[in-house]
Amino acid sequence: MPKRYTVTSALPYANGPLHIGHIAGAYLPADIFVRYLRLRGEDVVYVCGSDEYGAAITMKAQKEKTTPRAIVDKYHTMMKSAFERFGIAFDIYHRTTEPIHTETSQGIFLKLYEKGEFDEQESEQYFDEVANQFLADRYIMGTCPKCGNENAYGDQCERCGSALSPTDLINPHSTLSGSKLVLRKTKHWYLPMNKYESWLKEWIVKEKQNTWKTNVYGQCKSWIEGGLQSRAMTRDLDWGVPVPLPNAEGKVLYVWLDAPIGYISATREWAKQNGKNWEDYWKNPDTELYHFVGKDNIVFHCIIFPIILKAHGEFILPTNVPANEFLNLEGDKLSTSRNWAVWLHEYLDEFPDKQDVLRYVLGSILPETKDSEFTWKDYQARNNNELVAILGNFVNRPNNLIPKFFAGVMPAQYELSDYDKNVLAELASYPDRIGDLIKNFKFRDALSEVMNVARLGNKYLADTEPWKIKDNPERIATILNISVQIIANLSILLKPFLPRTAEKLDKMLGFDGKLTWEDAKNTNWVKAGTLLQKIDLLFEKIEDDVIEKQIQKLTINNQQQTTNNQQSQTIAMANHSNEVKPLQTPINYDDFTKLDIRIATIVAAEKVAKANKLLKLTLETGIDTRIVVSGIAEHFSPEEVVGKQVTLLANLAPREIRGIQSQGMILMATDKDGKLRFLQPSEAVVNGAIVS
């Protein structure tokens, strides 16, 4: 048995809020595991923190027109608060911008450098001539060579999970300017991972085959057998941990070198605050190390970070990396860019007393070996049909019957029937069964078994029907006593999964919260004569209108974000057009005021006969219905333009074109590829609205 456990959850990037996909991937499973270990009395530290360096942060800062420091301060605070409100029980939630992290990261880098583990190479890196800078991996996008995803990043394909280098991409381009990239020479320090191939084959392919999850083992085995390449451990960037070497100005540590070291620096800070020796948790072979991550982080935690630890020579290696697959949402992939997500902080604002409901639903559908799906209808059904009808219903019966029959005082057990004995024996068998499932990272099955304890209680009460017994008070007392013993065991078994619900049961039973997992095998915890406190209903039914509101919110948010993305793309293309015509001769303000520019809607469209470039458009202007002939047929079909609101120069003198009287001009813009774009209002306005 290990003397202690170090448990980590992937450091979330501090460039946006948390959504339920993050929680189901790396945080809820780890939290269940850690709470279980603590109930067993194990020495465990659970660390996490905000990953505040890297290109993802600078990209967000550019998008929001602010500084990287402002971004990380904003989202670190938001994520830390959401984790606390949701009940993720970190021992410390740290930050990679803290000085102790810089010290730790630079120290490990220097140790590897001094041991000769790095190859110093001058190589060609992608350079954005429009932005005038070398690009970090996340600023580069192209087609994944393995799965064909056209939106793969320079360090990873988020569709297939493959770790990539920018030069692996097909048709790479800059996410800053959209321009094609050129290669220029720069110097970096590389980790020759191929040097560790033989060791990895021994450590992972042979040793971990029967202990690591099949999805994790399979991805690692495939990656190793595909051949490992040298990987740059530094980047040309101005936001990150500075490379601690002379003549390395403008270079920082690669985020996948410094971010996992964040686990170590967080442990150092926690140990300093709590009078512990941090090295016991990272360098002592009697300690087991567990990384909880999503499948997109498997390679970094199973191959790259272990190589770094192995090369350093003083650190323990992960015992297991129980990575989860992806959680989908309402039939589609979760997407922050499309705002197709259930954001944790918003959920907690709208459902402030339903943290455990979400923990239960996510715990029931965790994507442990394959992708799974969250839907609001399923959320409602699990709450109403399981939490309310099974767990809540069982607890509520003794909660009401004991005050009625025994003035709220725990009754004694009298003579037990064979059925009573069988129920108590079955009750005592659950802790080991559930514990074994948790230790093997089968959290869904473990939670299902906890609910089976509540089902056991419901069936026992339904079979014995104490409310119908009128002439045998000892039998009533025995039935209700056994029912409360089941609740007592539930108060322990629920703690890893639904901690707030378990606290309510502790309050009902007068427990101090100090019972251990082993205590759940005792079927006589609550003694006769104990004053039981009546508690409110554990769960409430969720009505249809609440769920419909959430589904509508998803759709509206997605539509708004799609519109915003399209506008941003149009602006970006316009800003980076390679051919911008010079300004024309200045005009007076009086000349400008003569232009009557209005918003109108195209209600009909057709091609002009024998004219490849012309469309005949019928417009509702709010004042009249008129015809405009427009030279956009090479860019748009008639079907594409009907229903669009457009910008119309309404007082342009009528002009006959191909025998058609045209009354005005549609205003358009040309993107960098020469394609016409409508100038449209960001949201619908009344026809006839004046553009000024």
Image (cartoon, grey):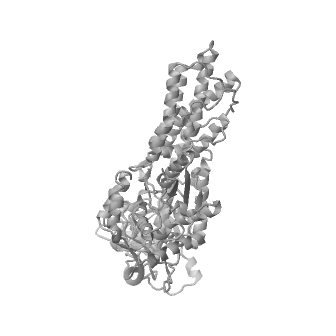
Of residues 332 and 540, the one nearer the viewer is: 540
Q: Tell me the quarter of the picture where residue 127 sits.
A: bottom left
Q: Quadrant of the C terminus?
A: bottom right
Report the residue that reaches farthest toward the top. Answer: 471
Q: Tell me the quarter of the picture where residue 192 sits.
A: bottom left
Q: How many marks?
A: 0
Q: Can you see residue 307? A: yes
Q: Position of residue 29 (x, y in %)?
A: 49, 50
Of residues 30 and 585, the one nearer the viewer is: 30
Q: Position of residue 85 (x, y in %)?
A: 61, 52
Q: Position of residue 227 (x, y in %)?
A: 30, 67
**685 to 541, vertically: above or below:** below
Determine the residue positioned at 70% across, 30% down. 531
**619 to 550, vertically: above or below:** below
Of residues 341 and 500, the one nearer the viewer is: 500
**658 to 466, vertically: above or below:** below
Q: Tell me the quarter of the picture where residue 577 sits.
A: bottom left
Determine the residue positioned at 48% across, 33% down. 429
Q: Position of residue 235 (x, y in %)?
A: 45, 77
**434 to 329, vertically: above or below:** above
- Locate residue 285 relative to residue 201 in the image: left or right: right
Q: Can you see residue 374? A: no
